[in-house]
Amino acid sequence: MDHLTLSASDMFASNEAFVLTRAELDTRRPPALHVQDFYEMLWVQNGTVRLHHEDGKRDLAEGGLVFIGPDQPHGVQGRGEAAIVVSLAVRPGVIRAIGSRHEDLQGVAFWAGSHLPAITHRDIRQLADLNKAALHLERSPRQKLHLEAFLLPLLIALDRRPDGLSPDAPDWLVAACTAAQSPDVFREGAAGFVASCGRAHPHVSRSLRRYMGVTPSDYVNAQRMAYAARRLTGTGDTLAEIATDCGLPNLSHFHKTFLDAFGETPQRYRKARQRDLIQPRP
């Protein structure tokens, strides 16, 4: 299928790292998909937008956020009145440089590794923050420094596929594993994790074993102990406070779980790392 082509040489002035635009979309289907040799981040500010791509189409509600790479055919169409999108076009070299400096970005946004645009969603609060940051960017010089100041907080906030989870894991399990990194979920133990999945416990257990090789309890305890380790080194909170926040108020159980995870007691873990940070040993 033939595609229309957009070029960075036509889009950007010689001294511009990015171009930010807003538009109300036509409700007619685009006559053809188009490709471009630059990157683009696009989000739905109002209404509903249909994203057309090589594998079909997808309707995006307000807060839908799309990351489009070079040579990813796509088109957008308004669905109903007042479908408004914000588009941030970025020079290719800027995105490549950010990706080369931050390996943690692999698998998300522009670095998702798919032949299709990467799609995520911002809730009402997140969308308000995004629009506020975009307004500030719009008033800034179109330089790389200002662009990175806008992009990096957003990229940090995006959900990442949990370590060890198979790439072919279903979306509901990815979402549940991500949610389980929060104390609000792991504090409730395996039951809290299963509840966040919205599926029966046996199905969740089978799926987690298949796609990660662990049980719900194993996964939840790993998140609990990672959180506890951060609290032990970064705060002066008591062990009882940390254990309770992890959902393990029984200190004996907390000690055993931490020892199994890190090979040392919580007290020894805290003492060694706080001492070495403030006063390194020869």
Image (tube, rainbow, N blue to C red):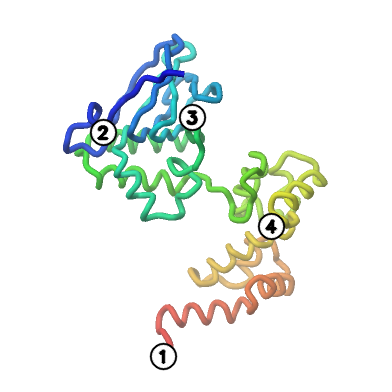
- Helix, strand or loop status at disc 2: helix
Earlier in the chain: of badge 4 and badge 3, it is 3
Whole-number angstrom distance, CA of label 4 to CA of label 1: 37 Å
Q: Work out whether residue 6 or residue 269 is closer to the camera in this orientation and state it.
A: 6
Q: Is residue 228 above or below residue 73?
A: below
Residue, disc 4: 219
Quarter that holds the C terminus: bottom left
- Helix, strand or loop status at disc 3: strand
Q: Residues within 10 Å of mark 1 (few under 14, many from 20)?
A: few
Quadrant housing residue 245: bottom right
Whole-number angstrom distance, CA of label 4 to CA of label 3: 30 Å
Quadrant housing residue 127: top left
Whole-number angstrom distance, CA of label 1 to CA of label 2: 51 Å
Residue, disc 1: 282
Q: Which numbered disc, 1 or 2, marks the residue closer to the eye? A: 1
* Badge number at residue 138: 2
Q: Work out whether residue 259 or residue 270 is closer to the camera in this orientation and state it.
A: 259
Earlier in the chain: of badge 1 and badge 2, it is 2
Whole-number angstrom distance, CA of label 1 to CA of label 3: 53 Å
Earlier in the chain: of badge 4 and badge 1, it is 4
Give the image location of residue 194, x and y in percent: 74, 47
**Disc 2 residue type?**
Glu
At x 28% / y 28%, what residue is drawn?
A: 7
Return the residue found at the far right.
Answer: 202
**Disc 1 residue type?**
Pro
At x 49% / y 69%, what residue is drawn?
A: 235
